[in-house]
Amino acid sequence: MGQKVNPIGLRIGITRGWDSIWFSQSDYKKNLHEDIKIRKFVQNRFNNAGVVKVVIERFPEKINVNLHTAKPGIVIGQKGANIEAVKKILKTMTDKPVNLNIIEVKKPETVAQCIAESIALQIEQRQPFRRVMKQELRRAMRGGVEGIKILISGRLNGADMARRENYKEGRIPLHTLRAKIDLGFKEAKTTFGQIGVKVWTYSGDFIQSKEESEEDKYAVKRRTS
């Protein structure tokens, strides 16, 4: 029986890099748990700032945290007050100085996580979920994505029995590994319970440069010879 696979994890090393950039033999467990704590803290602290991705780079004497966000003004705060406060907290968590780099997401209407957060926020504000889903579909297609699928599940409109509804436009080639598939997830907290929102976007295929393809051919020849 076929199982669902996270499209981001499946494509690491093909269309997307790692979100944790470090290697450690002795402190692997400690560093991994620290990364999880850092990500949870940052996402809870900037819950409504459109945080798409948190990339953590580790060095012997410091840690770099690269925060990809659709609303950099909210993250930075007045005269950088938020950044300084977060740096202090992260320093106490990791016992190392932390650099916090803010990277703006240029087209949030095409990023799956931003779309999921926008839909969840509007559902919490009691907007009709079908209208919200169709609006986000149109915005994403106008923004330049080649395909988008939105799935919401839960007690929609306060129904007694939970159900799911989805809308799709364009194509989402989940079996094509070179396809740039993005996945976003957010939960809307309503008076009837939580409603899950999942968004998949497809923004074209990853095409290797000529130099990279020649290197791959040479590597295959060496292995077979």
Image (cartoon, rainbow, N blue to C red):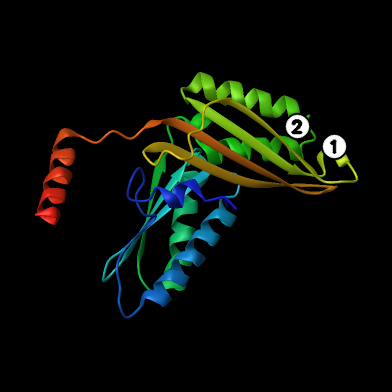
Residue 13 visible somewhere in the drawing = yes
Which residue type does callout 1 highlight? Asn
Q: Position of residue 42 (x, y in %)?
A: 52, 56
Q: Residue at x 28, y 33 (%)?
A: 207
Q: Is residue 213 above or below residue 127?
A: below
Residue 33 higher or lower than 197, as above or below? below
- Residue tagged 2: 129
Contact between marks 2 and 1 (CB within 8 A): the answer is yes
Q: Is residue 63 above or below residue 55?
A: below
Quickly name the residue at label 1: 157
65 vs 116, left or right, is left
On the image, the x and y values in percent for residue 126 come to 80, 35
Give the distance between the C-alpha atoms of the residues marked 2 and 1, in whole angstroms. Answer: 8 Å
Would you say residue 49 is visible in this rendering? no
Q: Residues within 10 Å of mark 2 (few under 14, many from 20)?
A: some
Secondary structure of the residue carrying tag 2 is helix
Residue type at tag 2: Phe
